[in-house]
Amino acid sequence: MKEPHLSDQAVFDRALDDLVGLDPRLAPLVAVAGRPALRRRPPGFAGLAAVVVAQQLSVASARAIFGRLEATLGGAPSVEAMLAAPTEALRAAGLSAPKIRTLTGIARALAAGEEDLDRLAGLPADAAAEALTRLPGIGLWTADIYLLFCLGRADAFPHGDLALQVALGDAFELGGRCTPIGLKAIAEDWRPLRGVAAHLLWAYYGARRARQGAPA
């Protein structure tokens, strides 16, 4: 099976059907969570900046900080605007010192031609993730989230994501949270649709927490 490009909801829904066909154990997750909405963000530096801002933050907090960052930069983040912005202004927008270093470091690397984000769309998901991790401050989680949300790569899979580990441990009755290594191994059965499985697991995680009375 060829990895589809998750360009819109209709493509995602077909890929979800294919995924459940690959692993029928996932059918009960759809019954609990419903059919997840496709998550997309713009590609390029602006999208990568949004993923960096969202690291270790709630959705609401990340959205608020990114909105202030856009206001500070006069629009969607660009390499040029990031390099021109004073550190004090970035800090006032709510960015932590490590995130400022990461975003300015990425901007310098892209300005110097050390990486071209546009070329990543033509690479296999794992190779594209490896290329992204060569940028300053980018780990595998950030790389996989960028590939999944910004490029629509159906096989990108952030196996280090805590919510995915909890969701799979619950769904497959593993007796606790699945380990990152275990999650990565199980996800091999879902190639080339691991990113579709991630969407389903996130939706399942949210649905279960909502039923338990906790914020999703």
Image: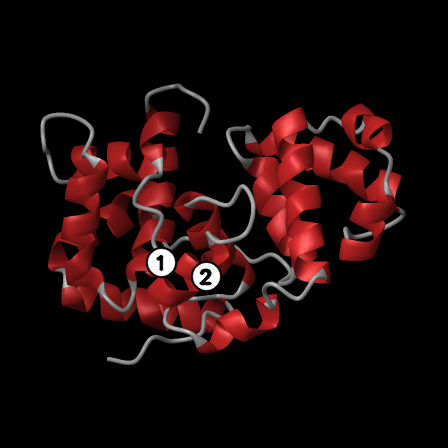
Identify the disc placed on residue 195: 1
Pick whichever, 98 or 108, lies toward us. 108
**x, y percent for residue 71:** 86, 40
Q: Secondary structure under badge 1?
A: helix
**x, y percent for residue 154:** 38, 66
**Which residue sits at x=39%, y=35%?**
206
- Toward the left, the furthest residue is 174
**Which residue sits at x=39%, y=27%?**
210
On the question of residue 160 being in view, the answer is yes
Left or right: where does residue 109 sit relative to residue 77?
left
User: What residue is disc 2 on?
Assistant: 131
For the N terminus, the quadrant is bottom left
Q: Secondary structure under badge 2?
A: helix
Left or right: where does residue 194 sit relative to residue 169?
right
**x, y percent for residue 169:** 18, 34
**x, y percent for residue 89:** 86, 30
Give the quadrant of residue 53: top right
**Which residue sits at x=35%, y=72%?**
14
For the C terminus, the quadrant is top left
Which kind of residue does numbered mark 1 sit on? Gly
**Which residue sits at x=58%, y=41%?**
52
Tell us which disc is closer to us: 2 or 1.
Answer: 2
Q: Is residue 174 above or below residue 131?
A: above
